[in-house]
Amino acid sequence: MLDDLRRYVEVETPSDDKAALSRGLSFVDGLVVERIGPADSSSTVDGGVHGDVRVLDFAGSAAAPVLLLAHYDTVWPLGTLAEIPFAVDGDRITGPGVFDMKAGLVQLLWAVRIARAAGLALPPLRLVLNGDEEIGSPASREVIEAAAVGVRGALVFEAAAGPEGAVKTARKGVGVFTVRAEGVESHAGLDPTRGASAVDELARAVLTLHAAQDLDAGTSVNVGVIGGGTRSNVIAGSAFGEVDVRVSSLAEITRVEGVLAGLTARHPKASLTVEGGWNRPVMERTPATAELHAVAGAAAEGLGLSLPEVAVGGASDGNFVAALGVGVLDGFGAIGDGAHARHEHATVSGLVTRTALTAAVLHALA
């Protein structure tokens, strides 16, 4: 398993490099065949400038398939491997993308392999491999949603949460917006009343947006980037702010949308507009997800393991599937720490226990 992971990590797959992503998907294709054999059926959707999306179906002993999500892109640019080479030091595995989320796919393939070797029944498996998750899945979202139709449930092989390997049964929805203010330029000293300051309008909008944050309700609102104006002695004619919104419920989406729609300019010569939208829907802990967690938890107990659950602020492709009413267990991948950080690492012990757990859960779902 470590050798497979090393070979996979050493094929760099940044989200913004189509050629590198093509090499990465080709490697994954070969690894799938090496470890569990060719799929009974496969399809590919061209990702355009993004990574292609591969959907692989494997026959099984149950009626409905289990959806397995594993993205092959990483946040790391080409050349990172030279700075952070793959290495194993005791229980610690390092390398770009090892935690998010290349170890997850290796664990999945070996789980299927060992389950078959042990003669365990498995359900039909539908594996979706996409190369654009780290940039919001613009090319793969519709493919993922189509693949989720009629499935028994979904396991997402993103990294687990915390040292205990908690699965994620709820994730926040993510909104990405840009607020643009348009004003009228004039000389700030000679003719200050003729102009209308876009910076002033944006500043008022920022205060309104930050006041809309409600952490008790699970909603964060952050204007993280602002810009505008030309010179200090010119009333600003334009300004913008980039906004990140995280919400835990559909009700909060509606409330925040109302706040955004209600942004208006104070000055009659100025205007405010809002662009953008919801990048990923809310992944709420539904009865279907609770049922899936109960099945997985019982399988974990049979191995002498526990399977805690958490709700997290980040989003994944699991959000798309959960919004369709499908039960989702996210975070079935590596145990470790440091997603998107230079201290990213997975653990050898987690690689082993998570593989065994995946095999047991898939068998239980059969």
Image (tube, rainbow, N blue to C red):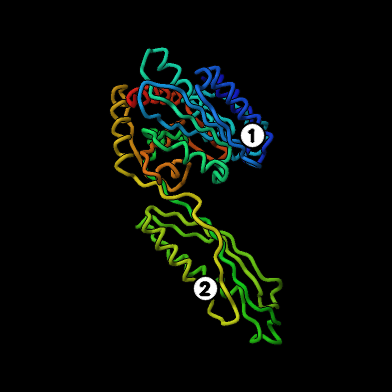
The residue where tag 2 is placed is: 204
SS assignment at label 1? helix
Residue 199 image position (x, y, % from top left): 60, 73
Does any portion of residue 73 appear in the rendered image?
no
Q: Residue at x 51, y 57 (%)?
A: 277
- First in sequence, mark 2 or 1: give its number: 1
Crowd band around label 2 with a 10 angstrom C-alpha radius: few (<14), some (14–19), many (20+): some
Residue 46, quarter of the rendered image: top right
Quarter holding the C terminus is top left
> Image quarter for residue 240?
bottom right
User: Circle 1 sits on which residue?
Assistant: 21
Which is more toward the observer, 172 or 45?
Answer: 45
Q: Residue at x 69, y 34 (%)?
A: 19
Relative height, residue 352 to residue 182 (above, below) = above
Q: Residue at x 30, y 39 (%)?
A: 290
Q: Quadrant of residue 202?
A: bottom right
The mark closer to the camera, 2 or 1, is: 1
Instruction: Check whether the beta carbons of the residues at disc 2 and disc 1 lie within 8 A of each other.
Output: no
Amino acid at circle 2: Arg
- Any mark on residue 215, and which? none
